[in-house]
Image (spheres, coloured by chain):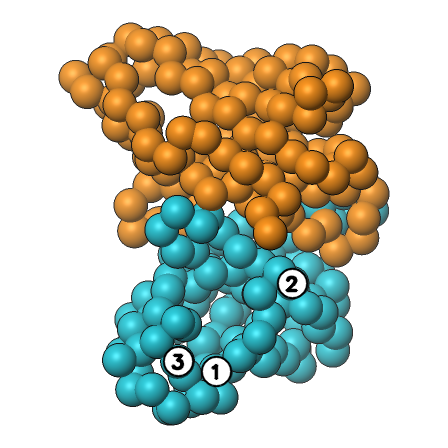
Chain colours: A orange, B cyan
Amino acid sequence: QQQVKQSPQSLIVQKGGIPIINCAYENTAFDYFPWYQQFPGKGPALLIAIRPDVSEKKEGRFTISFNKSAKQFSLHIMDSQPGDSATYFCAASIFGNQGGKLIFGQGTELSVKP
Amino acid sequence: NAGVTQTPKFRVLKTGQSMTLLCAQDMNHEYMYWYRQDPGMGLRLIHYSVGEGTTAKGEVPDGYNVSRLKKQNFLLGLESAAPSQTSVYFCASTQSVGKGPGELFFGEGSRLTVL
């Protein structure tokens, strides 16, 4: 049973477009929501993370929007570039939980066309 | 600056064979994890460890065993491989400082095929 549901499974945008990837979670105890980026043949790497005490966090061209009441969060990539083509995973965890089990979504394969 | 190293990177097994995947980290991290990645399923946690000598079950532990005899190493074992265990396996580690899970550092993966 997937505790974090991610959509869409794949996404194609033109260079300069703004791809949006959405995630929904069930466990209201989750309070730490990172996004990981994975290039082909590599392991995932942390991109950006948010805690629910803020509704938005921005780092460079990447923005997380968080809606606590709807139990949803999303990743926006501004002015997307071909180099952003990768698989993106949302995840959720309990911040204070020692051991920090991170539960991942299903992943979104993003392709940015030149 | 190795980070997290997984061996082997590729392996083909026949059904019923056994094997061990090795994960080594040189960052002195307390926490280590084994995930499997399958198309459309994302990353699913198999087992994890919160310190040397400890292990715990994740979301999909059946058919796997783990050991953490040394802080820097986390081994994932398949006693009797099945085709359903064909996957890409990722090891990760983090140094939680008591404020949450922290950033996970992943290895480059081990691709396992079970025929």
In this view, the residue in front, B4 or B21, is: B21
Q: Can you see residue A59?
A: no
Q: Which residue is mark 2?
A: B58
Q: Which residue is mark 3?
A: B82
Which callout, 2 or 3, points at the residue further toward the start of the chain?
2
Residue at 46% from the left image edge and 48% from the top image edge:
B42
Q: Secondary structure at mark 2?
A: loop
Q: x, y percentage for residue B6?
A: 43, 67
Q: At label 2, which amino acid type do we have?
A: Gly
Q: Which residue is mark 1?
A: B78
Q: The C terminus of chain A appears in which quarter of the rendering?
A: top left
Residue at 30% from the left image edge and 83% from the top image edge:
B13
Task: Tell me if mark 1 has few (under 14), some (14-19) or many (20+) residues whose alpha carbon lies within 10 angstroms of its own.
Answer: some
Q: Is residue B9 above or below residue A25?
A: below
**Spatial CA span between label 1 and label 3:** 9 Å
User: Seen in the image, is B84 located left or right of residue B74?
Assistant: left
Q: Secondary structure at mark 3?
A: loop
Q: x, y percentage for residue A9?
A: 38, 35
Give the mark toward the camera: 1 or 3. Answer: 3
Q: Residue furthest left?
A: A114
Q: At label 3, which amino acid type do we have?
A: Ala
Q: Secondary structure at mark 1?
A: strand
> Is label 1 in contact with label 3 (beta carbons under 8 Å)?
no
**Spatial CA span between label 2 and label 1:** 15 Å
Q: At label 1, which amino acid type do we have?
A: Leu
Q: Chain of mark 1?
A: B
Q: Are marks 2 and 3 on the same chain?
A: yes
Task: Tell me if mark 2 has few (under 14), some (14-19) or many (20+) residues whose alpha carbon lies within 10 angstroms of its own.
Answer: some
Q: Chain of mark 3?
A: B
Task: Tell me if mark 3 has few (under 14), some (14-19) or many (20+) residues whose alpha carbon lies within 10 angstroms of its own.
Answer: some
Q: x, y percentage for residue A44?
A: 45, 45
